[in-house]
Image (cartoon, rainbow, N blue to C red):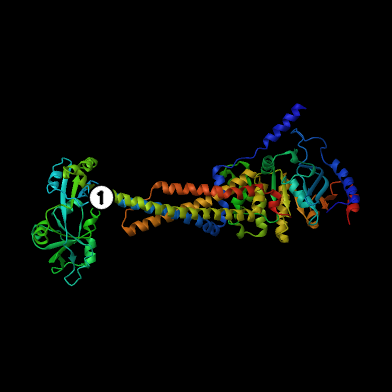
Amino acid sequence: MTGLARRRRDRRAQLRPARLSPADRLRTGSSGLRARPTRVVLSALGIAIGIAAMVAVVGVSSSGQAELDQRISRLGTNLVTVEPGSDLFGGAAKLPEEARARIDRMPEVEHTSQVELVGGANVYRSDLVPSGESGGIGAYGVDLDLLEAVRAEVDEGVWLNAATTDHPAVVLGAAAAERLGVHRITPDTLVLVGGTYFSVVGVLERAELAPELDNAALVGQEVAEEVLGAKGEASTVYVRVDPDHVERVRDEVGRNANPEKPNEARVSRPSDALEARQAADQTFQGLLLGLGGVALLVGGVGVANTMVISVLERRGEIGLRRALGATRRDIRGQFLVEAMTLSALGGVFGVLLGSLATGGYALLRGWPVSLPWWAGAGAVVATVLIGAVAGIVPALRAASQHPTEALGAG
Amino acid sequence: MTAEKPEAAATDSCEAAARPSTAVGGPAPTTTRDPGPAVEFTAVSRHYPGGVRALDGVGLGIGRGELLAIVGPSGSGKSTLLNLLGTLDAPTSGTVRVFGYDVGALADDQLSALRARWIGFVFQQFHLAPNVYAVDNVADGLLYSGVPARTRVRLALRALERVGLADRAYHRPHELSGGQKQRVAIARAVVGSPRLLLADEPTGALDTTSGETVMRVLRELHGDGVTVVVITHDRELAAALPRRVEVRDGRVVSDSALPGDAPCRTEAGR
């Protein structure tokens, strides 16, 4: 009898269901999608929109960062500015006259230039403008090598040169030109600086490392002293430093500029401000990413919904497959793979859409296009996971369906 | 379909008559020398929740290589019978043995494997996947048998040849006539060389000519040694088959294979 029992067990052991190969799993899992392309497109669209939004946010932010990095590396992070701060009593301090010369003697310093804000010299388009409407434009006496130090560019016209330093010629900062309504430079474009007409020879582009120069009228130091009453006191010293020693110079330059009262010299590094601005944008990005996440969630619910309906509609197919020998596991796997494929299709489409949006936006802004690879890969992995979660309940429901029930009562 | 006492008695006598016709009455056949019957029902009942008795104490034996019709009007329990024959369902009481396996004692996975290897189904509504080539529809009949994809296609082409549709292999279902669709479905059912072919109203959705073609194909398969069970409500179609089992109200009321056929029919017939 034991032999008989064992043989019976052996026969049962023969009845082991075959396992589907991964390729077959994928094929059966996508068969339902191939049969209903419209529905696939519509329900994958939800996922695609969410993913596209998130990829675009990451892409735009990364492109913006790339642009900023490019700009900063063009402008250089090795510019240090020294300005007079305030004295112990809160009054305005002055930089000693020889400050620039002393800074120049520091071994790590490559180049310096200075400007002097001429107090009381207001700038007007003409003498018909009421004196109260100066627009806050400051008149500066500048050295000829200023542009080299701050790496600003001339937008229109020319920069001051040896011939124009002792003539009443002026170069306007970008904002100042805008305010004064100087759009084109002709030989008779004049502005009134400190009561004297100066001819405008050039307009600068925005000076990103020296924003104080944007709303300024720049005249040669000699003219400033002769005509406007400048005193030769630096209001800002621009210091270009050996890039490897920026930190050291930054710490020591104040003492060199004003050895007696080092606390009265205010030292800063303008490129820090540019970098800080990018950080501020990140709050906004977080919001956009959150919105993308909500869209993704809604997309996931859409996939779950589509799958539930699909399972209801395909009771006959489920029954047929059970009749052909599919196990519950096979059915569960089929619908799970289908949900994952559906969602991943949305993900791939979303990555494409998001990349296009990133590219378009970056081109529009003249930025370099940059999209980290992990954004695309992460998006697709995330959608596969979303699909798996969305597909669990429909797949379990499909698998628990009784095969006879699925074929319908005949 | 709720049983009444006198009928129950009549069924019991029929069942008693049915039993000797089966080859084996004892435990499951375990030797390969005597393969035993294809299917063996012993006092099988299938009740559904709510008191519906779809089958009530049915005894039935189907030998290997038989071709028979199970005939009865709708609601007679013949679909329940088909589900039990195909191991898609288990009896509420009694035992169903398919190729010696006690269906009620097998796990769901084992039943799936049993169907994948030995049982082929043909349905009235064909159940072909739309927009999928006939050959791929047929190849899906082997999907759950562990056969590699390339072999599946090769066997599918051979199965289509067997039902006379070799030239329609790369047609989609909507490009085929009803009869052709049913032949594709038959090819799918037999592509895995099952021992038992269950056809549920195979001609129900077809015109006479197509129906005849389908029946011819089924006869040919029977000729090749396959056990073929045709479930139908069509008495004319059933009459053309070697054996007829008539089902009514969840009971077998006549079986042409039994000598004591007539009394059963008269007692149970209305």
**Residue at disc 1, secondary structure:** helix
Residue at the location (19% across, 46% down)?
A240
| Residue B6 located left or right of residue B170 | right
Residue projecting furthest to the front: A89
| Residue B199 located left or right of residue B16 | left
Q: x and y percent of residue A96 in the render?
A: 14, 48
Residue ID for mark 1: A270
Quadrant in which the N terminus of chain A is drawn: top right
Disc 1 residue type (three-letter): Pro
| Residue A372 located left or right of residue A261 | right
Q: Is residue A225 visible?
A: yes
Judge by depth and name the residue closer to the eye, A257 or B139: A257
Q: Is residue A28 visible?
A: no
Q: x and y percent of residue A375 in the render?
A: 42, 48
Chain hosting mark 1: A
A326 lies above or below A315:
above
Judge by depth and name the residue closer to the eye, A140 or A210: A140
How many circles with numbers are drawn on the protein? Answer: 1
Mark 1 Cα within 10 Å, few/some/many (few <14, many 20+)?
A: some
Quadrant in which the C terminus of chain A is drawn: bottom right
Judge by depth and name the residue closer to the eye, A342 or A249: A249
| Residue A211 located left or right of residue A378 | left
Judge by depth and name the residue closer to the eye, B139 or B252: B252
Q: x and y percent of residue B161 in the render?
A: 63, 50
Residue projecting furthest to the bottom: A128
Q: x and y percent of residue A24 in the render?
A: 56, 45
